[in-house]
Amino acid sequence: MTTRYLTQLLGIELPIVQAPMAGVSSPAMAAAVSNAGALGSIGVGATDAAGAQGMIAEVRARTAKPFNVNLFCHRPAVADAALERAWIDRLRPLFAEQGAEPPVRLTEIYQSFVTDEAMLAMLIAERPAVASFHFGLPSAHAIAALRDAGIVLLASATNVVEARAIADAGIDAVVAQGWEAGGHRGIFDPDAPEARLPMAELVRQIVGAVDLPVIAAGGIMDGADIAAALRLGAAAAQLGTAFLASDESLADAGYRAALAGDAAKNTTMVCAVSGRPARILANRFAALDADVDRADIPDYPIAYDLGKALNAAAKARGDYGFGAQWAGEGAPQARSLPAADIVAALAAELGIAMEQNDG
């Protein structure tokens, strides 16, 4: 479907979506992006209904424009005390390096939207313009309730099978997340083999398979990249890493330093940080992952409980090497500018690229 259809559906001027990076994309970022004519996003998957409601209120205090609220729809974690104890013991020497003790036990640090009725009730009451799903889909009941509330729905797909499931579920548009994308893979089943399709090939396949607008995601950093995605048949592009170094980003000093250094040139897909595959800047946690068997890692987000504890211990001593420094393959091109200026630059570059193509 066309760019015009999608931008009208989302209530935006530009075919640009700021990715909902939980922990990094602040309400201030979302509002600035929306005010600049694109679709700003907040990621609420790592908080509860009250926390998400507070974030929505913060965005609305800064903009009257539409914005997106992103939810995690992962399968609920299955606890395994023996596996979790073994994982704690495996990382214990790293805690010792930081003069710290690991947690005695690990917990499921946040709830999947699949089972979170309080989050669903809050969204129906608040009625954000757009909601999106990552890691899968909620129940048919939840989808119907959100649609009845007038909320436009998006969902991430990493392959055609997922895209067809999204279309069959009545979702309004699909985010085609290429292998280059930073952060967590949206794959529905993290234990299934990955085709590892690059964004361009994934967009081609999904455009040909479903009658939904497709939003391209993965390695898109400038207006020329957006234009290339549109030429592939995408109706818009989603960019996350492009906003990581923005003024409104919640990335800490160590994250920003890594993004500006050699680590940005060597992103890699890891599971050890959280328990699900995610693309990260080259750091000590990324190096650890290379020596870990996937079967030894507890379920997501139980494993993330230990990852966050290790990062906190290291960060307290000025060591940022264990941060969840998610980033896509275009990381070296990230711009340190206000989010609105990044949107303006993207729009200008897109216009030039489209004119050149037309010529």
Image (cartoon, rainbow, N blue to C red):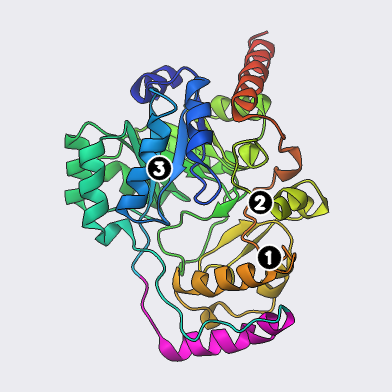
Q: Within 10 Å of the Cα at label 3, are there few (<14), some (14-19), or many (20+) other Cα atoms?
A: many
* SS of the residue under disc 3: helix
Q: Which residue is mark 1?
A: 315
Q: Quarter-wise, where is residue 96 in the image?
A: bottom right
Which kind of residue does numbered mark 2 sit on?
Asp
Q: Position of residue 135 (x, y in %)?
A: 41, 56
Residue count near mark 1 (Cα–Cα under 10 Å), binned few <14, some 14–19, many ≥20: some
What is the quadrant of the C terminus in the image? Answer: top right
Q: What is the quadrant of residue 293 in the picture?
A: bottom right
Q: Is residue 15 above or below residue 266?
A: above
Residue 252: numbered disc: 2
Relative placement, left or right, of 60 versus 181 is: left
What residue is disc 3 on?
55
Q: CA distance from mark 3 to mark 1?
A: 25 Å
Q: State if disc 2 and disc 1 touch (CB < 8 Å).
A: yes
The magenta segment: 77-97
Q: Mainly helix, strand or loop, the magenta region?
A: helix
Residue at 57% across, 53% down: 183
Task: Give me the C-alpha separation between circle 1 and circle 2.
Answer: 10 Å
Furthest residue toward top: 359
